[in-house]
């Protein structure tokens, strides 16, 4: 039923103005035209990310969105750090860390939060 339909990430934020600075400015996502007040849409590759105002912003304790960045993960981590993004440190079984990147076998992932505490990540693929 839904297997051949497109899906998009939906992320709740407290302030649309703060979110716009982060998602467009810090992350470099392309903002799409929006007709609704308190709602922003961004193009990220072939995907869309919808950001909307909600009193429940930042209450999700799991990853809300992940970008697959391939071998560029370390370069992107450094670029985001230069823009003030702080990376999360987690202790997972069978996982080591190389700086801000968590390594488990061939998987390399780095987690960070948006201004409302939504957990986001980048992964090598």
Image (cartoon, rainbow, N blue to C red):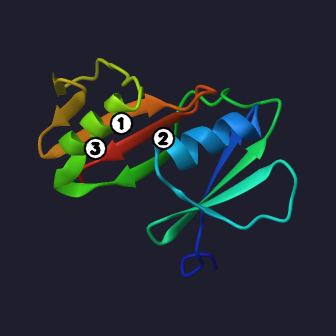
Return the x and y of residue 63 as percentages of the image width and height.
49, 38
Q: Residue at x 25, y 34 (%)?
A: 78
* Residue 20 to residue 8: above or below: above
Q: Residue at x 47, y 38 (%)?
A: 120
Q: Badges 1 and 2: C-beta atoms under 8 Å apart?
A: yes
**Can you identify the residue that label 3 sits on?**
76
* Residue 23 to residue 113: above or below: below
Tell me the quarter of the image containing the C terminus: bottom left
Q: Residue 26: which disc?
A: 2
On the picture, is 13 further left or further right than 28? right
Q: What is the CA distance from the residue labelled 1 to the residue labelled 2? A: 7 Å
Q: Residue 45: which disc?
A: none
Q: Nearer the viewer, mark 3 or mark 2?
A: 2
Q: Secondary structure at mark 3?
A: helix
On the picture, is 72 further left or further right than 53? left
Q: Quadrant of residue 90?
A: top left
Q: Residue at x 29, y 55 (%)?
A: 69
Tell me the quarter of the image containing the N terminus: bottom right
Return the x and y of residue 95 as percentages of the image width and height.
19, 27
Q: Secondary structure at mark 2?
A: helix
Q: Badges 1 and 3: C-beta atoms under 8 Å apart?
A: yes
Between 92 and 72, the one lying in front of the other is 72
Q: Secondary structure at mark 1?
A: helix
Mark 3 or mark 2, earlier in chain: 2
Return the x and y of residue 97 as percentages of the image width and height.
17, 24
Between 1 and 92, the one lying in front of the other is 92
Mark 1 or mark 2, earlier in chain: 2
**Can you identify the residue that label 1 sits on?**
80
Q: Residues within 10 Å of mark 1 (few under 14, many from 20)?
A: some
């Amino acid at each position: 039923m839904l297997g051949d339909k497109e899906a998009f990430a939906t992320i709740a934020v407290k302030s649309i103005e703060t979110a716009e600075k982060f998602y467009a400015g810090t992350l470099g996502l392309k903002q799409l035209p929006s007709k609704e007040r308190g709602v922003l849409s961004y193009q990220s590759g072939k995907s869309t990310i919808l950001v909307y105002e909600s009193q429940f912003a930042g209450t999700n304790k799991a990853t809300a969105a992940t970008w697959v960045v391939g071998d560029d993960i370390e370069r992107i981590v450094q670029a985001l750090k230069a823009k003030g993004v702080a990376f999360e440190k987690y202790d997972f079984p069978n996982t080591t860390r190389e700086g801000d990147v968590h390594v488990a076998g061939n998987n390399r992932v780095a987690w960070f939060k948006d201004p409302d505490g939504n957990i986001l990540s980048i992964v090598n693929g």
